[in-house]
Amino acid sequence: MSDNVAATRCVVFLAGAGAGQTSLCEAVLFNAKAIDRLGKVDDGNTAMDFEPEEIKRHTSISAAVHHYDYKKHRVFIMDTPGDSNFMSDTKAAASVADGAVVVIDAVDGVKVQTETAWAFAERFGLPRLIFINKMDRERADFQATLADIEKSLETRTVALQIPIGEAESFSGVIDLLSPKALAFPADGSGKVERGDVPEDLAVAAAEQRESMIETIAEADDSLVEKYLEGEELTDEELAGALKNGVLAGTFVPVICGSATGNMGVGVLMDLINDVLPSPLDRGPRQAMAKGEATEVAPDPGQPMSALVFKTLADPYAGRLSILRVFSGTLDAEAGAYNVNHETKEKFGQVLLIEGKNQKAVKSAGPGDVVAIPKLKETVTGDTLVDDKRKVRFEATEPLPPIMSFAIAAKTKGEEEKVFSSIARIAEEDPTLRLDRNEQTKEILLSGMGQVHLEATIEKAKRKFGVDVELLTPKVPYLETIKKKTTIANRHKKQSGGRGQFADVTIEIEPQSRGEGFEFVDKIVGGAIPRQFIPAVQKGVVDAMTTGVLAGCPVVDVKVTLFDGGFHPVDSSELAFKIAGSVGFKKGAAQCQPTLLEPIMDIAITVPEENVGDIMGDLNSRRGRVQGVDAKGKNQIVHARVPMAEVLHYAPDLTSMTGGRGSFTMSLDHYEEVPAHLQEKIIAAAQEEEG
């Protein structure tokens, strides 16, 4: 499809929530005439936010793909979520892009989510441009935002512009490369009127231009020498050094404008063409072939290879696999070989994605992002190739889920339909995890936060017609013992015919935390026949699945069988199993049983000014702060806190930090529940049972 690989661009738009990357994509597409009207996120009519859940929430929840043709270049753009609930999609899109546009709010500056998105770009080595957006908003501040970027993102920037006015008076920029004044009419047309630098900004512009030239020249040793000798650098030399510096990651160019006002967007489009890499600039992609590392060149003449980085599940159209082509030509009639599943996939269509719409194309080449419908075996992360060369690309790992809810069908009898529908959605969203907790008997849906899980439930209703309820999950408490005891238990039953008889004496004692269960056979002299001893152990193990306090599994105990008795006729495996089970229950009740609760290891990233509130809140949740690390202008608070206290932590953190906080959480260990809380937990368990 893209005949000229050198003129192809594959660009991911990255930002924190609310910075305006969707509006910027909209303006770019409008200026390139890929869409015929300029939609608005608040009106729910943009080309890139088209899912009903996105329109309702006024935010991107899924990476969207489009393309445009501009000044003899074909540019594929991916608009990604900035909300931490949905950033696994952002990571996946960044992993297949060649370059990135990072959008930063001129009022709010760098957010925690911006840092997360930036880290993705760093990890995948993406050359970047920064667009400071919302320059026409109240309190917009270009220089303060620039300083914030350098400090928070720990990067070296080169400002290619200075704004003419800010907030309500923002009307254009001084392009330091020309140097000319670029006026942006406030009519949304995206036009640019070129003129001379205003007199009142001439001195500042000259100083900034010198600083810019000095920074850009550093990307080329020969230019540094020329610059230091006082020679003028030509426009061509500056342009070449600017691109080299961006590709090498020496610096990140910064420009500014307003996406919703369509101001400065054309300059960004020129920069994407001029300084962001083509697949050829990016060079070969790393892959594996026959267990060894190899390289795949972005050459249309090579065997085809592509990576599926996203899947859409549709109840009517079936599965839609979205992929980036890295080499060769993907032909609609040739089919492809799935390396991960070692199977041939046949298909009759290759689709060019245009937001929510698609159009069929005959083929796709290096740098292209396209979709294939209804592949039978292919899922996100799979590599599709021409079977002449079976290479496999490493897929990016989804972000780990941080929050779980129990799910239940609102309509009785629809449990299976609920499970299968959510499983279908999990195909397109690898951050979702669906598990059954054997202990609590609940189906747990885990994801990146409450908003993520609520959006999933909304999608299940819209796509598959199932009503799902999100419930607070039960905490998986455990039970253990603190004292040692010896108990003798005789099981005797006579009801006509053959009876049941078993006599066991066991010693029950606590083990250290985490040591688990140990069964010791100390029977001597045939007090219990050998064939019945495994039955005693099985009875004990069965009894341990429901403890004596709140019906929770019992852990970290040692049981020693050291005496007993049997009847030559009435003894059986069943009798000894019952004797072992009942004996353990009786004995455990005498061993000072206690409840254990899961303790989570939590890392909370927040702005410095929120640290005190976070630590105070953790203390109120019975948490123990382990330490605080600095990360740019943010702090990471490390703590251990009981799971019961953080089941709804995501919305609470959002409330405390105004949406600027994020966290990760994992199980660390179990420890004893304080006595005053044990009574409440036991009472609640008994009430539920009774």
Image: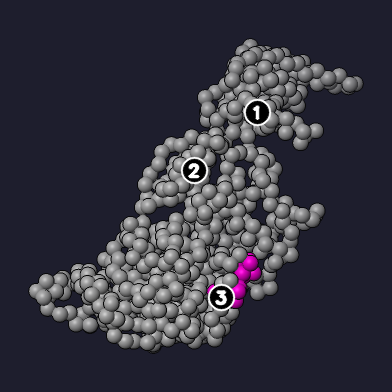
Instruction: Say whether residue 209 is visible.
Output: no
Specify few, some or many for label 3: CA neighbours under 10 Å numbering under 14, 14-19, or 20 or more.
Answer: some
Q: Earlier in the sequence, mark 1 or mark 3?
A: 3
> In the image, which is nearer the foreground, mark 1 or mark 3?
3
Q: Are marks 1 and 3 in contact (CB under 8 Å)?
A: no
As drawn, which residue projects farthest toward the left? 229
Q: Residue at x 52, y 24 (%)?
A: 512
Provide the residue designation for mark 1.
678
- For the magenta stretch, what is the residue range? 43-56
Provide the residue designation for mark 2.
614
Q: Nearer the viewer, residue 463 or 317?
A: 463
Q: Residue at x 35, y 62 (%)?
A: 144
Task: Tell me the number on the disc at residue 345.
Answer: none
The amino acid pointed to by label 1 is Gln
Q: Residue at x 66, y 44 (%)?
A: 473
Specify few, some or many for label 2: CA neighbours under 10 Å numbering under 14, 14-19, or 20 or more.
Answer: many
Q: Secondary structure at mark 3?
A: loop
On the rendered structure, is 417 left or right of 668? right
Provide the residue designation for mark 3.
40
Picture coordinates of residue 558, whole percent (x, y): 58, 22
The amino acid pointed to by label 3 is Lys
Cα separation, mark 2 vs mark 1, equals 26 Å
